[in-house]
Amino acid sequence: MPDLNHDGDSAAAVSSLRSAVMLLGRRLKHQRVDESLSPTEMSVLGTLARCGSATPGELARKEHVQPPSMTRIVALLEAKGLVRLEPHPDDRRQKRVSQTERAEAMLAESRIKRNAWLAHLAEGLDEDEWETLRAAAPVLEKLAHL
Amino acid sequence: MPDLNHDGDSAAAVSSLRSAVMLLGRRLKHQRVDESLSPTEMSVLGTLARCGSATPGELARKEHVQPPSMTRIVALLEAKGLVRLEPHPDDRRQKRVSQTERAEAMLAESRIKRNAWLAHLAEGLDEDEWETLRAAAPVLEKLAHL
DNA sequence: AGGTGGTATTTAGCCTGGGTAATGAGTTAC
DNA sequence: GTAACTCATTACCCAGGCTAAATACCACCT
């Protein structure tokens, strides 16, 4: 564990981190790459793209959402044709969720839009700041999944 | 503006940043330092602590929230005795919002709890990762307020 | 002075996206 | 073979944003 008393700025840093994340999260909710797709739905698609396929329960744990919420999210994604549901081979209680070809296409397109959004957002940052953020991205991700 | 084509990782970084922020934000909502105080209410108190006093409109702009939402937040804070509302000296349309002594005490206490939460969270990070995060905190804050 | 347009705040009502509790089907352990 | 547990689902609820419209006030321009 890091030495939290390394200097007094740690408390300030966590405070600033906390409020920045909350604020950014609020703004990101509106900054959707694809209208009609909520941030969590996007996130689930991203997870599926990385993991191949998963059960609703696994997805709920990875996204830190309660199972009933994931049920609803998966149902919405299925209705939009972005996800396929199959019975689980070994356990008939579970289901396997996997993304469709259409989801892959959508993710590819959204990556393009994200770059545009990024370019706009990054106008206010200089090269060093951007570099710092790039380095922090994987750490934040790790932190979020702790 | 940073060179977004510096390498291909930029798109991946923004994608990872985006999902990490959304996920962390969701978790932070539950990780409240003070039950009975929403994240945005905390954030408003933090802003007031930094700025001294402000009008509801100014607060709404700083928190990137619509004015009606800020009205409700301020009303809740006032009901909890954390904030004081006074008429604006020059303009009777506006009001001045300032924190009470009780809010200062609460913020001090919450800082202690935040350190405990931080210590727990940071157990999963090594010193380098934590350092990266410390460096990124102010940049994230800047980004959030862009 | 008086009217006109603009701004700060509030009120009323809506909607999204999460949550909890309870149910049903299926599995596992004893 | 039954008791206890797990996965997914259904039904319902609530918080915390939003928009639109109302209200009060200011500033400017004849």
Image: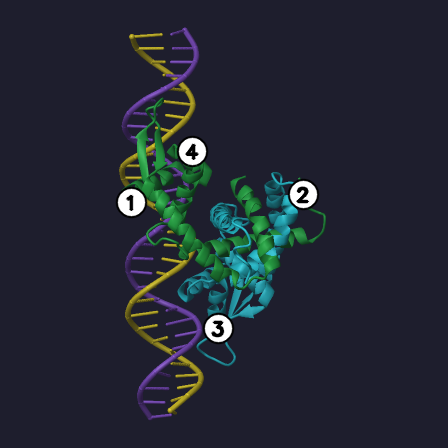
Chain colours: A cyan, B green, C yellow, D purple
Chain letter for mark 2, please.
Answer: A
User: In the rendered view, does B95 fall on the left or right side of A4?
Assistant: left
Quarter of the image where the C terminus of chain B is located: top right
Q: As shown in the figure, which amino acid type bears the numbered disc 1?
A: Lys
Q: CA distance from mark 2 to mark 3?
A: 46 Å
**Tag 4 residue:** B58
Q: Residues within 10 Å of mark 4 (few under 14, many from 20)?
A: some
Residue at the extreme right: B6
From the viewer's perspective, is the residue at label 1 or at label 2 nearer?
A: 1
- Per the rendering, the mark at residue B80 is 1
- Identify the residue at horizontal 42%, vertical 33% (top origin): B58
- Per the rendering, the mark at residue A12 is none
From the viewer's perspective, is the residue at label 4 or at label 1 nearer?
A: 1
- Do discs 3 and 4 belong to a common subunit? no
Task: Assess whether mark 3 and mark 1 are in contact (beta carbons under 8 angstroms).
Answer: no
* Residue nearest the viewer, comparing B14 with A108: B14
Task: Assess whether mark 2 and mark 4 are in contact (beta carbons under 8 angstroms).
Answer: no
Q: As shown in the figure, which amino acid type bears the numbered disc 4?
A: Glu
**Tag 3 residue:** A95
Q: Residues within 10 Å of mark 1 (few under 14, many from 20)?
A: few
Res A81 seen here: no
Q: Residues within 10 Å of mark 3 (few under 14, many from 20)?
A: some
From the viewer's perspective, is the residue at label 1 or at label 3 nearer?
A: 1
Q: CA distance from mark 1 to mark 2?
A: 44 Å
- Where B119 falls versus B83 (above or below)? below
Q: As shown in the figure, which amino acid type bears the numbered disc 2?
A: Glu
Q: As shown in the figure, which amino acid type bears the numbered disc 3?
A: Lys
- Identify the residue at horizontal 40%, vertical 42% (top origin): B44
User: Which numbered disc, 4 or 1, marks the residue that appears first in the sequence?
Assistant: 4
Q: CA distance from mark 1 to mark 3?
A: 47 Å
**Tag 2 residue:** A127
